[in-house]
Amino acid sequence: MQIIEVLIEYASHTLDRPFSYLYKGQKKIAPGFRVLISFNHRELVGYVLSVKDSPLSPQQLEEEMGFHFDEIVDVIDESPLLNEDLLHLVNQVSEYYLAPRISVLQAMLPPSLSPRRSSLKAPKIAYDQYVIINNYNEDNLTDKQIEILRLIQREKKILKREIGSPSIIKKLLDNERIKIVLSEKRRLSLPTYTYEKPPLLTEEQQKVIAEFNQSKDEIYLLEGVTGSGKTEVYLSLSEEQLKRGKSVLMLVPEISLTPMMMEYFIRRFQNKVAILHSELTPAEKYDEYRKIARGECKVVIGARSAIFAPLENIGLIILDEEHVESYKQDSQPFYHAREVAIMRGKMHGAKVLLGSATPSLESRARASKGVYHLLTLRKRVNEQKLPKTTIINLTDYHNIDRESYIFSLTLRQKLASVLARHEQAILLINRRGFSTNVSCRNCGHVFRCPTCGIALTYHKSDNMLKCHHCDYVEKMPETCPECGSPYLMKTGFGTERIQEEVHRLFPQAKTLRLDSDSAKIRQKIPSIIEAFRRKEADILVGTQMIAKGHDFPDVTLVGIVLADIGLSMPSYRSSERAFQLITQAVGRSGRKDKVGEAIIQTYNPSHYAITYAARQDYEGFYVKEMGMRKLQSYPPYCYLASVTLSSKKEEQVITQAYNVVDFLNEQLGEAATVLGPTTPYIPRDHLSFLRTVLIKYRDYEKIQLTLKRLIDIYQKKASINLTINIDPYNF
Ligand code: ADP
Ligand code: ZN
Ligand code: ZN
């Protein structure tokens, strides 16, 4: 008999400890297996932490321990899900982010392998049937049969369904001339690209590569202006690792937005590449995951969670566009792929390379202090000049076009000339939908989401009001629900409205729209991008999605319709976000052989985030913004942690939030500054009221224990929920 310690699938802190069960069955069982258990009369999935043999009988054990052990209902897996170093990583991530271990496992594993009940219904292995020769012998066969037998002999192994002629195959199987072998199927079909020799590297690229290869440092920041050829550097460094017998992990923020990156890697490394990201089907993910675990692919490209890919012997981990916030998971365990990459890199003795034209302030500051090794690419490949940028002051009436509320005279005229030259333009507005605010003229009622409390956006195409935070939608009402007035006012504009405005002013122009609306089926994104590259449209209208690393050779104009949107967000990162977005968007203009132009429309023409972005001056912005952060004492001058409380009762959440502030102040004293409680920007979550307490600190070790105690206290309170987010972005 064996005593099995398991973690239960519920991701709560109370249950984040081993529960003991007995196993008397015959199946193989070991740490890292999933098992089916009974817990409080419910059948749940558990994750095995340890297995001990016991010489005692169940009765003896019960007498000795003083309680009854349940038996494991069944063993699910045939081999452990994680190797040693991933198991170790689970503990490290859970410890740093103060998250239940099971939540880390659930973030780490594809749905089919996840330790949760739903995984049992998820797809498992699929096989292809191949035929091979069993006993080559042409006696007593018809001509047709001989023909097929020879074909199989020649090819050695053929997919059964590709041969056709099922009756002949059956005959050959019956008289044992051939036999069937199963081979695991790969349900994801990757596009094929023919291998291309790498281009001759520029002097700057060569220098960066040599410096990287010669250095013994662990973490690098590659700061390279847009179009400076960072991808080629990634490819070249990856190739070097493969030559040394190491594997490579390549992370991108969102793979469907960067199909080019995948193409570059497949072109160079062919079938050594595996892909892992959230838009694969569970079946595809499962196949890719297992393929990687079997060691068949040495290069993995994927989004955030690919940082947990079961690669062995990693030599290099790359995070492209390292500043992008989607690298941070905004639910439990709230991990950031960059921090996990650094943990994993240490374990493997691998180098970590962070790349961006606009690095996050934290990373750039660490590079200044020598924590990261700074590498720079200052020039665009082909020495192409950066785009000529004009800031349009929307508060100056000279700039206003009386024909259009949306485009200034300059932007409208530039669009006209791009169309006349048969080139392409991109229009960016970081807001989707038609109108971003709907209210009643009579009583002032604002339409808000009933679940999370933020203003709803009007979408004209389907005449709906939609919440951009949760899934809530309702039909656009005819009258005000408060006072019955039919006079409803729609203000603020988004992508849908801009597209309509383009059609109104330039009826002959063909447009495409890229936002998470038109891309509801996310698979459509690459085809929209492709269509625009093929010049099937003149103007692409979109949200920040269009600013991400695409390379459109014929785009000579980028118009940022309203640069101020990000700046008005209540976050210490709002200037940084606005700067990054504008810089990246402007960088889309004039990439091949044509000089590009960019127009930035704004009500804050002298805001430093806008003026530095217009000049594509990252270093200038960095110095200025560091000054601001220092003044206000925000990262990178301190670290942050947020404690969020939620409850169905608003009074209770307020009282408890003040208790948390008192507790933290008392425990932490000088070690931290405690701010709040405040109502977060998204004030509700599934009808629960939220309050947030923010902690600013310098030494994590000094606050970690206190936060653990806080978790302990609150896990006993049933009506209130507490979550901790280390290094939060939104609060
Ligand atoms: P970044 O990611 O730094 O913005 P990219 O990697 O997209 O820049 O490179 C910009 C363009 O330059 C791409 O079309 C790429 O294929 C091309 N390129 C990069 N390096 C070279 C090189 N050494 N020789 C010729 N073309 C290059
Ligand atoms: Zn009203
Ligand atoms: Zn909502």
Image (cartoon, rainbow, N blue to C red):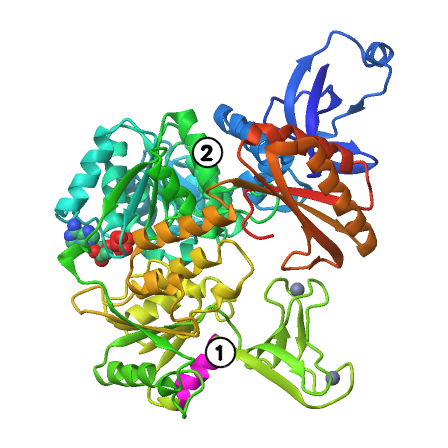
Magenta-drawn segment: 495-504
Left or right: 556 with respect to 718? Answer: left
Judge whether residue 284 can be spotted in this image: no
Q: Residue at left 39%, top 82%?
A: 396
Q: Is residue 460 depicted above or below 644 in this figure?
A: below
Residue 502 lies in magenta, yes or no? yes
Q: Residue at left 67%, top 14%?
A: 52
> Residue 317 appears in which quarter of the rendering?
top left
Q: Is residue 127 depicted above or below 135 in this figure?
A: below
Q: Classify mark 1: helix, strand or loop.
A: helix
Q: Which mark is residue 310?
A: 2
Q: Is residue 672 depicted above or below 484 in this figure?
A: above
Give coordinates of residue 562: x percent, y percent: 43, 73
Which one is earlier in the sequence, the residue at label 1 or at label 2? 2
Give coordinates of residue 182: x percent, y percent: 45, 38
Q: Quarter for ligand 1? A: bottom left
Pointer 2 local density, CA inside 10 Å: few below 14, some 14–19, many at least 20: many
Give coordinates of residue 381: x percent, y percent: 17, 55
Residue at the bottom extreme, as displayed: 403
- Please state, as top left, top right, bottom left or bottom right, where the N terminus lies in the image: top right
- Magenta span: predominant SS is helix
Q: Nearer the viewer, residue 67 or 682?
A: 682
Judge whether residue 497 can be spotted in this image: yes
Q: Residue at left 43%, top 80%?
A: 395
Q: Amino acid at mark 2?
A: Pro
* Residue linked to disc 1: 496
